[in-house]
Amino acid sequence: MSEYKFIISGELPTRNEEIAASKKHWGAEGKLKREALDRCGWSNIKQIPKLKAVKIKATFYREDRRTDPDNIISAIKYVIDSLQEYDVLENDGWKQIKGPMKLDWARDKENPRTEIVIQEV
């Protein structure tokens, strides 16, 4: 089984940021998602070959500890959507995303990022 790693620089939006954007303007949440998917595309995700199914491990490194973990890990949606957007997976359903998914969070004031490891299954 092959394993691939990609690193998304900066912080992906939290669930609270999504909610705030949706309340601000009808198109703001879509813009937030587009920017998050673009951020994922700036990583080396485009170098990963097309896979049939994967297990995912993600670690979300944040600048500080002000955001609750449940809001931080909601950004996995952007990661999974980007796997489909950048043609790593055909779809983002149950056949392509296998469990268990491992999600973690940590603080890195100097280098906030999201590290993703996907394992082909």
Image (cartoon, rainbow, N blue to C red):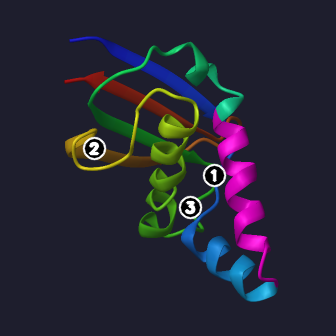
Q: Quadrant of the C terminus?
A: top left
**Left or right: where 99 falls relative to 54:** left
Q: Which residue in the structure is indicated by mark 3?
A: 65
Q: Amino acid at mark 3?
A: Arg
Q: Amino acid at mark 1?
A: Leu
Secondary structure beneath dot 1 equals loop
Residue 112: tell me if it is visible.
yes
Q: Which residues are magenta?
A: 25-40
Label 2, label 3: how far apart the Cα atoms are? 20 Å
Marks 1 and 2 in Cβ contact (< 8 Å): no
Query: For the point 55% across and 71% down, which residue is it?
Result: 15
Q: Quadrant of the N terminus?
A: top left
Residue 109: tell me if it is visible.
no
Q: Quadrant of residue 69?
A: bottom left
Query: For the point 57% across and 28% down, which residue is it?
Result: 7
Q: Which residue in the structure is indicated by mark 2?
A: 102
Query: For the point 39% across and 42% down, which residue is it?
Result: 91
**Left or right: where 27 falls relative to 47:** right
